[in-house]
Image (spheres, rainbow, N blue to C red):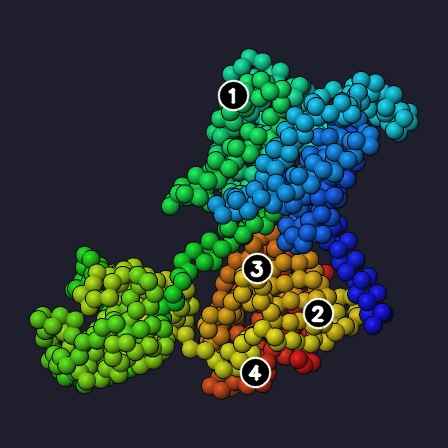
Amino acid sequence: MPLLSVSYLKKTISSNLILLGEGILHSYSQLFFSDNRWFAVLLMASTFVDFNAGLSGLVALVIALSTAQLMHMPTSGIRFGVYGYNSLLVGLVMGSWYSYSLHFWLLLGLISLFTLLLSVWINALLVKQRLPLLGLPFLIGTWTLMLAVRQFNSILVSDRGVFIFNELYATGGIHLVKLVETLREFPLPSFLEVFLKSLGAIFFQYNILSGALIAIGILIYSRIAFLLSILGFFTGYFFYGWISNSMGDIHYSFIGFNFILSAIAMGGFFIVPSIRSFLLVLFITPIMVILLSALSYIFLQWQLPLYSLPFNFTLLLILFVLKLQEKSGGLYLVQIQQFQPEKNLYRHRNELERFAHNTWVHVHLPFFGEWTISQDDEGKQTHLGDWKHAWDFVVKDAQNSTYRLSGTEVTHFYCYNLPVLSPAAGTVVEVLDGIEDNPIGGVNLEDNWGNAVVLYLAEGLYAKLTHFKKDTLKVKVGDYVKRGDILGNCGNSGRSPEPHIHFQLQSTPYIGSRTLPYPLTYYLRRKADGGLALHSFEFPKEGDKIMPVHTTRIIRDSLDWKPGQVWLWSVEDKFKKSNYTLRWEVTTDVYGRYCLWCATTQSTVWFVNDGVQLYFTWYDGPRKGLLYAFYLTHYRVLQGYYPEVELKDTLPLNKASKDLLRYLHDATAPFTTWMKASYYFKFTSVDDKNNPRQLIYSTNTNTQAGNLKLSKWQGEFELNENQLRRITIKGPHFNQEALWIGE
């Protein structure tokens, strides 16, 4: 028992120290809306150019995060620096303004705790409005500190900076003095010097060296953020000079950092980067100049600095207004934060391209086999006006005829008496039966819709199917049906001169309701050359020969991944000439989304199995290892064996490419796209087309800039006995084959 206690204690201390370390780094990077650790280290280093400020900031941060741990505050708030960065800023202010003493350290600890409590409280209030915390706790904490210190004679204003070269010599000797002299004498334009010092001023480091370190860090971390920082600063800088005829505040208090932070936040972090987000920065920054001037006049009366108040106020105002808008006007708020403008942009574009027409309720074709659309939107006969969004389906033969023999009887028509299926899961809300079939060429205008069924699919979404054969309906009002359940048989009742299925979506539950434009989820279309093309969330057109996608058991069962499944792989790395065993686990995240987890590489890939396709939605982790390669090459798989069908898809560029050109593309990505990552899938081998027990499909993932191919990944996957048995993937500096060895 004592041994277990000691072991448990060591494990607890270790995990707490790791959590504290992560919280410290993220607190620095949070100030530039990043979670990049290397960027955080560079930012931390920049704060120690003024050593006293850097040290007191770090101490305040450690006190705040350690207290948050002791108070068992949410781990996420600690790990990602949410509860730390405001205390860090307060500590930096204290270190830059006041002299070290026993009273100083005591006050530092107390004010960092006060700022922590403010962070938790204000964050809880803003979360309800889906707004970020930003620097409000820092501002309140700092102003409280400065007003209180006026009554504390034991806290002295620092005289550091008065004898700057003596201090530099004491800190780093003659070499540091010469370095600072060189930097001071370096011929920088005035506006560039102010830009760098304004960057440093974010961490209360009023020098070029800190600013240069931060600028380099931003450029490496994000090309878009770097462009935005320049756009925001110089827009504010020149507008301020033009409207005030004075650059005093900009040059001496370096309040231009408000323009930098707001530009990065508005242009690429909270709003997806685009031409419109850049224009927003261009127009909002002058408004911030006006706000800055007005607030400066007010705060001067209390002898308090503004710091980041203009940035906080403006950003919260913009975000609050955008969240109220029903239409974005081309400005898209980031829904799932990636902590880098490029990642936000590439994910947003990829999801728009892949899922722009995706629907919450999946509506499928209401029949088996291949049918032809005889009438669609704005049809020539009946699909007009408010009832135009509908389809009529018939069956045709090789001669494009809908009937055999003479075609004078309903029984001559191929579709007559064939089963009509439920297009989705739902509840029967209306049934009409008992209407006789019309003779061929005749119509029943009195009972226009004939025998009909209306299904409730979701709030504001109903499906109506009509012209059933009399007395074949198998459902009644109140029945719950699953997708694919038989509703009845195709007939010729109502306004129907020949047998067909009429199918429409509508927003109300009545048989005569107006139609609603709503795409069909998946269907196969017969091409002119006889091949098949897969369509997703589209509207088939008149004349299209279409059929539903039927899954193949070996594929369906092999890709039926359920939480709790564990796969063991024996991997041969042919590139590194080594072998190892790998373990993957199917699990869920906090939102209930399915994912594959690899503990070896600490990586996760999220997937969706919608019954027709299995596709990956996102990858998180290092861009190495088998799971990453699996994400690139197993990106989308059709679960029905159709050898003539080839799937195509696109990947987020930042996930597929590490090429040098990609970093250049990042800088232009908000305005134009000239690189892409494309995915291709096809079936290559099967042992039995009708009842396969062994099946192989292959994939290619290509990254290219225009016609220039940059990288290529190839995958081959073998299914056997309803299990994914073999994975073979080749790519840049990658060649691995994995064999399934059990669960």
First along the sequence among labels 1 and 2: 1
Pointer 4 residue: 722
Disc 2 to disc 3, C-alpha distance: 22 Å
First along the sequence among labels 1 and 4: 1
Badge 2 element: strand
First along the sequence among labels 3 and 4: 3
Q: Where, by quadrant of the figure, is residue 224 drawn?
A: top right
Residue 526 visible at all: no
First along the sequence among labels 1 and 3: 1
- Type of the residue with mark 1: Ala
- Type of the residue with mark 4: Asn
Q: Single out the residue that lies furthest toward the top.
A: 245
Quarter of the image where the C terminus is located: bottom right
Judged by depth in the image, the label closer to the viewer, 1 or 3, is 1
Instruction: Give the crowd class for mark 2: few <14, some 14-19, many >=20 residues within 10 Å.
Output: many
Residue 618's mark? 3
Where is residue 33? Give x, y as percent.
Answer: 62, 42
Pointer 1 residue: 294
Instruction: Give the crowd class for mark 3: few <14, some 14-19, many >=20 residues within 10 Å.
Output: some
In the image, 194 versus 155, the foreground residue is: 155
Disc 1 to disc 3, C-alpha distance: 46 Å
Disc 4 to disc 2, C-alpha distance: 22 Å
Disc 1 to disc 2, C-alpha distance: 64 Å
Along the horizontal axis of the image, is 415 left or right of 217? left
Residue 542's mark? none
Q: Name the residue at 38% across, 70% down.
A: 523
Judged by depth in the image, the label closer to the viewer, 2 or 3, is 3
Residue 387 in the image: above or below residue 27 = below
Judged by depth in the image, the label closer to the viewer, 1 or 4, is 1
